[in-house]
Amino acid sequence: MLIETDVVGLPVLVVGPSALTEPAVRRYRRAGAQVIGVESPTGVTPVLAEWARLAVLVGDARQWPQARAALAGSALVVEEAAPDTARGRVILVGAGPGGTGLLTIDGRRALADADVVLTDRLAEVGDVAALAPGAEVIDVGKLPGHHAVPQTEIERIMVERALAGLTVVRLKGGDPYVFGRGGEEVAAAVGAGVPVTVVPGVSSAVGVPGAAGIPVTHRGVSHVVTIVSGHVPLDDQRARALADLGGTVVVLMGMHNLVPIAAALERCGLDPDTPAAVVERGFTPDQRSLVGTLGTLPGLVERGGAASPAVIVIGDVVRQSQVWARRAGARALEVVG
Ligand code: SAH
């Protein structure tokens, strides 16, 4: 729930058992109020009652006569039901490959309505706290020791908060279902009986080549696109299948395996002169493309260095960015070799 009245600087008491008042305290703080939480029926002292302009009675506190009596005549009193534990839910939101502009309108709405946001490294939508003003933001991409929170722990936090009645947004880079472990998180929610929905996002597999002027399909050039994880090197069976299929191959998470991936594709029949590119840090001010061929790309990357995250694109469509850049007379933001 968003607070729409201007409460900046307003002295607010949030009264109720602490397990219930936490979301309200956070909401009013985020909205700029000065908030004091009161957890016991006798905790609203005359001094606090005098200080407060607004008192929010949450859950059981609506039946605390001492609190009501203390507040009578001094502060505006509003009542809030305890968060309904049956109303908790999980929304997986695809953040796109970078920048707030690539977050969908539904994604923004989900964030605006969130009580908790679990975010990570690749979900770079700028200021998550501003997009989710009522939410506790938990960065599961790093802990104090810079270790990522294990997947099972992410799922545990997500489910636990939803079972407590909160709206939990799991914000993920790109699209949640493209190498994003979105399926596992949906399964965890379903397994716990928590309602779950997925808001798709722009996947880097399509968006990042596009940002470098490479259409992943193009009439007359490629009508097949295969998205492959390069997390582990390609075995020959897969490399042969890709080479036989033709079209465009997009490799995510493949930079540390670029050399064996390119070698496997060549060995299994893909022409070393096939155009190929690496597009780094798509949609950031540091976006850069290295453009060559299957045969030259590993050397180009070795000489030019490569920064993460990056997408590898292999196929004739890569040439398209060059064609257009030339036609537009644009200086290509590229290293070509
Ligand atoms: N679910 C994500 C992909 C997660 S796998 C999606 O749909 O985009 C992570 C990989 O995505 C990275 O290793 C890299 O290959 C790619 N990637 C994500 N964001 C990127 C960006 N801004 N620029 C280049 N590659 C990106």
Image (cartoon, grey):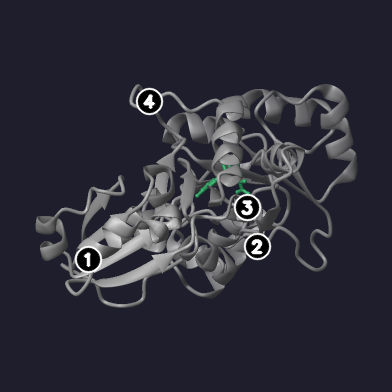
* Three-letter amino acid code of the residue under disc 2: Gln
Task: Give the tally of numbered discs.
Answer: 4
Front of the two marks 1 and 4: 1
Q: Which residue is mark 4?
A: 146
Quickly name the residue at label 1: 71
Q: Counting residues from the N terminus, which is met first, the one under dot 1 or under dot 4?
A: 1
Inter-mark Cα distance, 3 to 4: 28 Å
Distance (Cα) linking label 1 and label 4: 46 Å
Labels 2 & 1 near each other (Cβ < 8 A): no
**Mark 3 or mark 4, which has the lower sequence index?**
3
| Residue at the spot of label 2 | 320
Classify mark 1: residues with Cα within 10 Å, few (<14), some (14-19) or many (20+): many
Q: Is residue 2 left or right of residue 318?
A: left
Whether residue 278 is visible to the viewer of this picture, yes or no, is no
Residue 257 position in % (x across, y down): 62, 25
Going by the numbered disc 4, the residue's amino acid type is: His
| Amino acid type, mark 1 | Leu
Taking the image as four quarters, which one is ligand 1 found in? top right
Residue carrying label 3? 89
Q: Residue at x 31, y 45 (%)?
A: 39
In whole angstroms, how far apart are the C-alphas of marks 2 and 1?
70 Å
Please tell me which of labels 4 and 2 falls first in the chain. Answer: 4
Near mark 3 (Cα within 10 A), the count class, few <14, some 14-19 or many ≥20, is many
Which element type, helix, strand or loop, lies under badge 2? helix
Residue 50 in the image, given as x and y percentages of width and height: 11, 64
Residue type highlighted by circle 3: Arg
